[in-house]
């Protein structure tokens, strides 16, 4: 199984202790971690390994942490399975940046700095606004969009059939939750988040990120990368910059992104990141595809055995 699609985790997947066993057992992991700490000017790895949880959960910390974790995991998997041949990549929100780094769109350090800035800009936007998010379970997209329009909030994530997330002002999200059943939605759950990600409330973060992306050295990806914003492959530097910018306030079209990859003929996926969130979503999108989740040494060894 050499031809495989690599998928990278998004914000929310982080957990204290992430990548610690890799660091303790692998010179490759230690080298990447050291490079990250030097590039950022502080010890990201201390926060990843030891927390505290409220520090790692900060948008400015968890985004570079997940980026580093994903790329360490990929490097270790490639060491163990030399025949591994990623043929395409995608990532959930923040994970799209990790996917581009894995595809060689930009360097490890450049990507890390952009991600750290993106996290800081989004954190600033959260503090400057009063926003929230809600997960809607069991509704059709058309119904959810009608509810979003009624409550004046945005569709943030189309994660899987029957699992869509709304984002916007506190008042708007509360209104959407109160009216959800009227729109045929089974459950509406308010999320424990710092702000309204992937909504118009992130506009200040998007504008700041656009300036950073304008000066980023962007190469043609070595493998196709599917963008969240368009759910299509982005081959040129201009398209890559634009979709990474638009993604901050735009919808994460994850269901369509996975269907795009399946439509390209891909059936085997690896999730690189803490937890098994992506594997769960992909199973809801198409139960016939295979997803291996790799987050720590035991899951790395299991994947190595399966893929070798």
Image (spheres, rainbow, N blue to C red):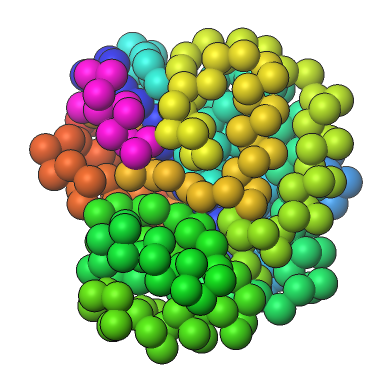
Asked whether residue 70 is in view, the answer is no
Residue 289 location in percent, x, y?
17, 35
> Relative to residue 143, is residue 94 drawn left or right?
right
> Relative to residue 63, is residue 42 drawn left or right?
right
Q: Residue at x 48, y 67 (%)?
A: 149
The quadrant in which residue 82 appears is top left
Residue 301 location in percent, x, y?
31, 38
> Relative to residue 68, is residue 137 drawn left or right?
left
The quadrant in which residue 140 appears is bottom left
Asked whether residue 291 is in view, the answer is yes
Q: Residue at x 83, y 35 (%)?
A: 212
Residue 12, above or below 224: below
Of the 4 image quadrants, the one containing the C terminus is top left
Q: Residue at x 59, y 56 (%)?
A: 198
Residue 1, above or below 285: above
| Image mark count | 0
Residue 35, above or below 297: above
Residue 143 location in percent, x, y?
31, 65
Foreground of the two, 154 or 133:
154
Residue 103: say if magenta. Answer: no
Of the 4 image quadrants, the one containing the N terminus is top left
Residue 287 location in percent, x, y?
13, 44
Q: Main secondary structure of the magenta part?
A: helix
Q: What segment carries the magenta color? A: 256-267
Residue 261: say if magenta. Answer: yes
Report the residue that reaches farthest toward the left: 288
Q: Residue at x 49, y 85 (%)?
A: 175
């Amino acid at each position: 199984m050499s031809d495989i699609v690599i998928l990278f985790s998004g914000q929310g997947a982080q957990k204290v202790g992430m990548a610690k066993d890799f660091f303790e057992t692998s010179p490759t992991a230690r080298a990447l971690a050291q490079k990250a700490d030097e590039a950022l000017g502080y010890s990201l790895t201390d926060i990843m390994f030891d927390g505290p949880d409220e520090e790692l959960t900060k948008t400015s910390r968890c985004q570079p942490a997940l980026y580093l974790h994903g790329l360490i995991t990929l490097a270790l998997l490639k060491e163990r399975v030399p025949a591994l041949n990623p043929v395409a990549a995608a990532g959930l929100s923040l994970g799209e940046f990790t996917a581009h780094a894995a595809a060689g769109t930009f360097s490890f350090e450049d990507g890390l700095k952009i991600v750290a800035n993106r996290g800081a800009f989004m954190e600033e936007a959260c503090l400057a606004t009063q926003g929230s998010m809600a997960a809607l379970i069991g509704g059709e997209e058309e119904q959810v969009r009608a509810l979003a329009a009624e409550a004046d909030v945005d569709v943030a994530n189309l994660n899987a059939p029957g699992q869509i997330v709304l984002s916007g002002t506190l008042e708007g999200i509360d209104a959407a939750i109160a009216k959800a059943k009227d729109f045929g939605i089974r459950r509406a759950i308010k999320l424990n988040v710092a702000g309204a990600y992937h909504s118009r409330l992130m506009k200040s973060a998007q504008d700041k990120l656009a300036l950073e992306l304008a000066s980023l050295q962007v190469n043609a990806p070595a493998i196709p990368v599917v963008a969240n914003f368009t759910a299509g492959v982005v081959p040129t530097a201009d398209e890559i910059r634009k979709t990474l910018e638009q993604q901050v306030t735009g919808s994460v079209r994850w269901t369509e992104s996975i269907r795009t990859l399946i439509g390209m003929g891909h059936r085997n996926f690896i999730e690189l990141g803490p937890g098994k969130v992506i594997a769960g979503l992909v199973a809801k999108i198409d139960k016939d595809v295979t997803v291996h989740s790799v987050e720590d040494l035991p899951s790395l060894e299991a994947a190595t055995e399966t893929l070798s």
